């Protein structure tokens, strides 16, 4: 079991070249990285390429604008964004409410 309440918050400044500060609680065990992330209004994760792994992003709260290989997806609470290995993506919060996501990056 992973208890995010017991994991210290890390501030990720301009994560992957994005805008603003992201609050992240990160679990890593060498097989997978799991992060619970909070993005406030006008905060983003910059465009980056997943060369060695995929990423699964589940939206717990809010609305995410996901840009993947030049396509835009609007992903809402209860929905999932998938970035396959080899693809590039970015995630933006343009709404007033906090965007809360669970991001899973398995080692492949």
Image: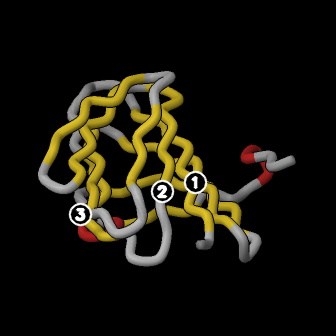
**The C terminus sits in image quarter:** bottom right
- Asked whether disc 3 touches disc 1, contact meaning CB atoms under 8 Å apart, the reply is no
Measured in 3D between alpha carbons, the distance from the residue under mark 3 to the one under mark 1, in whole angstroms, is 17 Å
Residue that carries the numbered disc 2 in the rendered image: 55
Image coordinates for residue 18, horizontal then vertical, percent: 25, 61
Label whose residue precedes the other's in the sequence (1 or 2): 2
Label whose residue precedes the other's in the sequence (2 or 3): 3
The image quarter in which residue 29 lies: bottom right
SS label for mark 1 = strand
Residue that carries the numbered disc 1 in the rendered image: 104
User: Residue at position x 27%, y 54% from top?
Assistant: 90
Residue 18: image tag: none
Compared to residue 63, the image places residue 44 above or below, namely below
Residue that carries the numbered disc 3 in the rendered image: 47
SS label for mark 2 = strand
In this rendering, would 84 be left or right of 96? right
């Amino acid at each position: 079991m992973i208890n995010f309440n017991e994991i210290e918050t890390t501030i990720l400044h301009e994560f992957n070249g994005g805008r603003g500060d992201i609050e992240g609680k990160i679990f890593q065990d060498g097989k997978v990285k799991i992060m619970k992330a909070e993005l406030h209004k006008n905060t983003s994760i910059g465009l980056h390429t997943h060369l060695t792994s995929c990423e699964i992003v589940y939206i717990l709260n809010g609305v995410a604008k996901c840009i993947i290989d030049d396509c835009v997806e609007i992903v809402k609470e209860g929905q999932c964004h998938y970035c396959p290995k080899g693809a590039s993506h970015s995630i933006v919060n343009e709404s007033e409410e906090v965007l809360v996501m669970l991001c899973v990056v398995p080692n492949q």
